[in-house]
Image: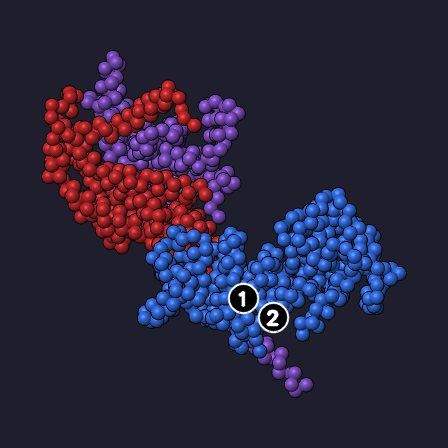
Amino acid sequence: MGYIELMGISKSYNKQSNVLNGIDLTIEKGEFFVLVGPSGSGKSTLLRMIAGLEEISGGTLKISGEIVNHLPPKNRNLSMVFQNYALYPHLSVEQNILFGLHAKKIDKEIQRKRLEETAEMMGLSELLKRKPRELSGGQRQRVALARAVVSEAPLCLMDEPLSNLDAKLRANMRIEIRRLQKRLGLTMVYVTHDQVEAMTMGDRIMVLNDGIIQQVGEPIELYNKPANLFVATFIGSPKMNLGKAVLKDSKLLIENALEVPLEQMEVPTSLQNRDLVIGLRAEHMPHGSEQHQIQKVEIVNVEHLGNETLISFEVGTELWTAKWLGQWLVQVGDIVPIHISVENMCFFDADTGCLIQEAAFSQKQEVVSK
Amino acid sequence: MSMTKPMPDALEIQEINFESVKRKQRVKSFTKGMLFLLPSIVLFGVFLFYPLFKTMYLSFFLTNARGETTVFVGLQNYIEMFTSPIFHQSMKSTFLFVLYTVPTTIIIALLLAVLANEKLKGIGFFRTIFSSTMGISVAAASVFWLYMFHPSIGFLNRILNLIGLESIGWLTDPNWALIAVAVTTIWMNLGFTFLVLLGGLQSIDSYLYESADIDGAGYFYKLRRITIPMLSPTLFFVITVTIINAFQTFGQIDILTQGGPQNTTNLIVYSIYREAFSNYQFGTASAQAIVLFIIILVMTIIQFKLGERKVHYQ
Amino acid sequence: MTMPISKKILFYFLLSIAALVVFAPALMAFVMSFMENKDIMTGTIPQSLSFDNYLKAFEQFPLLKYLFNSLVVSIVITIGQLVLSSLAAYAFVFLEFKGRDMLFFLFIATMMVPFEASIIPNFHIIRDLNWIDQYPGLTVPFFATAFGTFLLRQNFKQIPKELREASQIVGMGDFKFYLKVVLPVAKTSLVTLGAYGFLTSWNMYLWPLLSTTNDTVRTVQIGLKQLQTQEQLNDWGVIMSGAIIVIIPTLILLFLGQKQLQKGLTEGAIK
């Protein structure tokens, strides 16, 4: 039995159309669980329902085996970190950290001890007397985290906690939050719209769109085996290249423009005689040197990232991007050979958008890792 | 079968529990909301809504000196009021008074606000002076002007005499008394109106002026094309507030003229006061109070309706 | 952008003239309050200025008592207004319950009822409560204000909802949150409303005139009227000194809080 269990959870406002629909989910104790999705997908609403800040319209929510649908937030034994940190502007850092303990009337002696420990851990010992407005963005963030840590609640909820920080600080805080969570053995439910954050932090990720679960799984699983086209394009950067395709005489015709030979790959019956969408990751289209399965494409855009080079080209009406390791001195208009293999392709149903078959390449990899 | 049967039941029981918990929470949050609002609601009820209905009720009766109803007279009080020449005079004076005070107050206050909106050294001092009349009470202001209007030693008549004109009986001449009261009122309201208009001016985005400067617009062009239109919500608010205030004028009259001479300054609130607390005619006074209420009501509704786009409270 | 000197001079000239005209009545009263009566009567420039008029005003009239009464009445009304309107504003911003919108409309409706229109029954209520010549009679009817509620509501709405949610998670109740977080955070707008409330209550005229019949709780405004009507000798110096005393507290308040008031009034009204 999981630590948090959601059974058929739904949310609607004014009994009208649902914001969230039939969410079934189990989160394990000590897990770093990320809810990711575009804005308006319902991820924050779901988090707030777990917190008890939002009424649950339907379904059952259990925390450590107990039904908590009806319990107010304070009886759910959790802490929460908000996007805007929700620091009390008139209170000092110390008073902000102790706010919850004070409200719960915890013994003064214990308060002091926990404050010292937490401040030490978060590197706030020097700032205790300051007001929030005298702190930098990163320091405020730390105070918000400290408030969650000091509560010693086993469950911590975070709602886009890093989105107000600049890119560099954000990368640091990602690691810091992750380490904190492991060190304290917290169960973490973390909401973000940033797939990089989700991929780098989560033990498991749930992708949510329009109030419906798209996929739940480990980061690598989501990357290699996206359950549908939404996940395929949402996870990973640059996004997965997609193209309409049909199987024809042992060849795969993509966007009526690209013909890829099937080679020795056996064609499953599930792929035959239907409209397909194929997906191909940018890094799976290297420069075609001596290999076979080479396509000639005309470059329409080049991005030099230093350690790698992004090459864009047109396939029918789609714009595809390939990622080549190293620095390539190519220019727009050049015709370059590129390696495109069926082995690396994911196959989706064109009508439903669901995955039919994952890339053969990743199947092999999984075998290796196991 | 025996295993699966109890399951839905158990679920249903839970559902019912949630519903009752939800209902309890709703009752609880309603009670909490009411507790926060109760003090205000009770006081509004006792000192505002109840007296309003009581006033309506009283307006259909004759009363004794203690204000207890004696005889039901129906609309008689209203009929008498509308046929009474004194009330006619009172209404006429009230509307004239509004006409004298409102435009003048706003124009002068606007001029002062435009002047005081310039970024000059020491402008704070002038702003303080211009807003100062807001801090001067009706009683004090009336006493100041009582001197200004004094027939023999008053400042105004001294000035008139100095330039060879005859003295004016500011407060005793029926042709001048209402004007004298209006002048006092304009002066008193200047501070508040100035302060609000200045606030409105300062909230106009300065880049509008900068872009007009780039286009080479002149001072008065900017005033007419940027300042006044951008200020219109504030102006609108100030106009309605000043009108409502003008209808509620009392203190100046009580100190300066007591409604005289020949009832020319017997504005409606003073008329109500005199009818109720000097003549003890609470019935007819109530009928007049209802007229005042309706005037203010209409003014407020106009303010809400016309100003809906600009003056919203939600 | 800097102004050319000639334009600057023009502005200073206009400002000075305007300031002189606006301030003239108060200024004259101020000067007269230090003049001897015979100088006032003849309109001559005084030879010497003295505090005699002030001493006389305090001797002949219980001005100190009136001032004290006004102070008590104004402070009590101010506190009452702050408490009631902050509670109501809290409910309108942070609490969700059935009928809230209807009650909000009720508050708006109160702005359509002028106090003067309901003054007759109000007087009878105060009389029947035996509150004539009592502090409660002068103060309690003014505790509830729609204006104050709207002004504070505007301000409370700027407090992030997350502050309330963070406090809910640690189990803090609404009243405690109101007391410990909302009031301190909204301090400046409370000060603004307080200053405005004090100003208007200090300057109240009609109601104190009706609800006081003797000196026990009579406010200084009514005292000034008494001074003016009873000063048979037409001693303008004494009358003016009384008037100056009356306006000093509010003028000081206005000078200190002018910026705040201006912002508060515009926000409460226009937003």
Horizontally, is A237 left or right of C169 in the view? right
> How far across and down, in percent of the image, does residue B190 sit?
34, 32
> How far across and down, in percent of the image, does residue C166 sit?
44, 61
Residue type, mark 2 in image = Leu
Label 1 residue SS: strand
For this rendering, which residue is in front, A354 or C21?
A354
Which chain is rendered purple in the image?
Answer: B
> How far across and down, in percent of the image, does residue C194 sit?
32, 47
Chain A is which colour?
A: blue
* Residue A189's disc number: 1
| Residue C110 appearing in the image | no
Count neighbours of disc 1 (C-alpha within 10 A) and say few if under 14, some if 14 to 19, many if 20 or more: many
Q: Residue furthest front?
A: A290
| Residue A269 appearing in the image | yes
Horizontally, is A217 left or right of C262 in the view? right
Residue found 39% across the figure and 64% down from its top: A120
For this rendering, which residue is in front, C180 or C254?
C180
Residue found 52% across the figure and 56% down from its top: A170
Q: Quadrant of residue C184?
A: bottom left
Q: Nearer the viewer, mark 1 or mark 2?
A: 1
Image quarter where the N terminus of chain A lies is: bottom right
Q: Which residue is mark 2?
A: A25
Chain C is which colour?
A: red
Residue found 42% across the figure and 43% down from its top: C267
Query: Colour scheme in the image?
Result: by chain
Label 2 residue SS: strand
